Image (cartoon, rainbow, N blue to C red):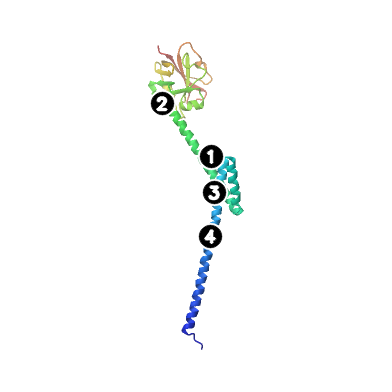
């Protein structure tokens, strides 16, 4: 029987160890090469994403960035060159992802602008409420409201509206206002007004005080109460709750 001596066993062990070491080294090298290739791919991919995103944004918003058409064209050329290194499937995914992202950014920007406009509108409402000299005051009802021209929804949303067919100072001054369902329901309680209650009306021309002489319900089609008069009076018109065909009408004569 042949028996390996010490030297032969040592040589065999050393050969097996070296073989295993070479195998591990080759495996590590293969992993390293894969990582390098993967990083290059990701770098190319991210470059394509960045260039494409830049191109889209510059194309759609060149006026905002104040840039020339040549800059946009050059950006497109760079994108075209880099995108050749990315597979068509991956490029489609990248493009779709970035377009969705840009659309989301535009949506968020639009919402921010909407919120800003709303905030500015509210600020304007506060400003006109506090500083407008054209006003109506009814002490009994604690009403102190600004007035604006016209009776459109926009005017009545923030103020009491003035019927444009009536004069602002002389004769019959006719005003309209909401009494429910809106943020500014200035005429909500005017149905409680009684004879001799006071109404104070102010413009840039001065101030007049009126004494209530009439509080009644009229038909929606009855415009006789806002016709011009020789005496100075003020007429307030508002809706009648749950009665679409009728209006509440208050009239007051100037207190001399």
- Asked if residue 195 lies left or right of residue 3, the reply is left
Rounded to the nearest whole Å, what is the CA distance between mark 3 and mark 4?
21 Å
- Asked if residue 119 lies left or right of residue 59, the reply is left
Instruction: Name the quadrant of the C terminus.
Output: top left
Q: Which-is-in-front pick, marks 1 and 2?
A: 1
Indicate whether 253 appears above or below 49. Answer: above
Rounded to the nearest whole Å, what is the CA distance between mark 1 and mark 4?
37 Å
How would you rate the neighbour count of disc 3 (Cα within 10 Å): few for under 14, some for 14-19, many for 20 or more? Answer: some
Q: Which SS class for mark 4?
A: helix
How would you rate the neighbour count of disc 4 (Cα within 10 Å): few for under 14, some for 14-19, many for 20 or more? Answer: few
Residue sticking out furthest to the bottom: 1
Residue that numbered label 1 is attached to: 65
Judge by depth and name the residue closer to the eye, 239 or 242: 239
Which label number is shown at residue 14?
Answer: none
* Image quarter of residue 201: top left
Q: Quick one: label 1 or label 2, which is nearer the N terminus?
A: 1
Which label number is shown at residue 50?
Answer: 3
Rounded to the nearest whole Å, what is the CA distance between mark 4 and mark 2?
68 Å
Q: Are marks 3 and 2 in contact (CB under 8 Å)?
A: no
Q: Quick one: label 3 or label 4, which is nearer the N terminus?
A: 4
Rounded to the nearest whole Å, what is the CA distance between mark 3 and mark 2?
50 Å
Indicate whether 144 appears above or below 213. Answer: below
For image coordinates 46% across by 32% down, the residue present is 120
Q: Which SS class for mark 3?
A: helix
For image coordinates 51% across by 71% down, the residue present is 22
Q: Quick one: label 1 or label 4, which is nearer the N terminus?
A: 4
For image coordinates 47% across by 83% down, the residue present is 7
Residue that numbered label 4 is attached to: 36
Q: Quick one: label 3 or label 2, which is nearer the N terminus?
A: 3
Residue that numbered label 2 is attached to: 130
Judge by depth and name the residue closer to the eye, 232 or 42: 42
């Amino acid at each position: 029987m042949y028996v390996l001596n010490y030297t032969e066993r040592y040589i065999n062990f050393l050969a097996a160890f070296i073989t295993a070491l070479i195998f591990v080294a080759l495996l590590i090298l293969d992993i390293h090469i894969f990582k390098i290739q993967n990083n290059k791919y990701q770098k190319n991919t991210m470059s394509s994403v960045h260039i494409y995103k830049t191109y889209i944004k510059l194309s759609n918003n060149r006026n905002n960035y104040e840039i020339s058409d040549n800059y946009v064209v050059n950006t497109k050329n760079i994108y075209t060159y880099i995108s050749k290194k990315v597979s068509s499937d991956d490029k489609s995914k990248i493009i779709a992802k970035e377009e969705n992202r840009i659309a989301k950014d535009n949506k968020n920007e639009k919402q921010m602008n909407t919120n800003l406009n709303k905030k500015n509108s509210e600020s304007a409402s506060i400003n006109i409420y506090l500083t407008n000299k054209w006003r109506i005051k009814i002490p009994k009802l604690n009403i102190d409201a600004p007035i604006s021209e016209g009776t459109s929804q926009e005017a009545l949303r923030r103020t009491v509206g003035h019927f444009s067919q009536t004069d602002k100072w002389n004769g019959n001054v006719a005003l309209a206002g909401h009494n429910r369902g809106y943020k500014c329901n200035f005429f909500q309680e005017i149905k409680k007004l009684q004879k001799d209650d006071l109404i104070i009306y102010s413009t840039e021309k001065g101030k007049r005080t009126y004494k209530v002489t009439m509080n009644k319900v009229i038909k929606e089609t009855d415009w006789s109460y806002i016709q011009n008069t020789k005496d100075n009076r003020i007429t307030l018109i508002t809706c009648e709750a749950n009665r679409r065909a009728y209006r509440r009408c208050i009239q007051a004569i100037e207190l001399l």
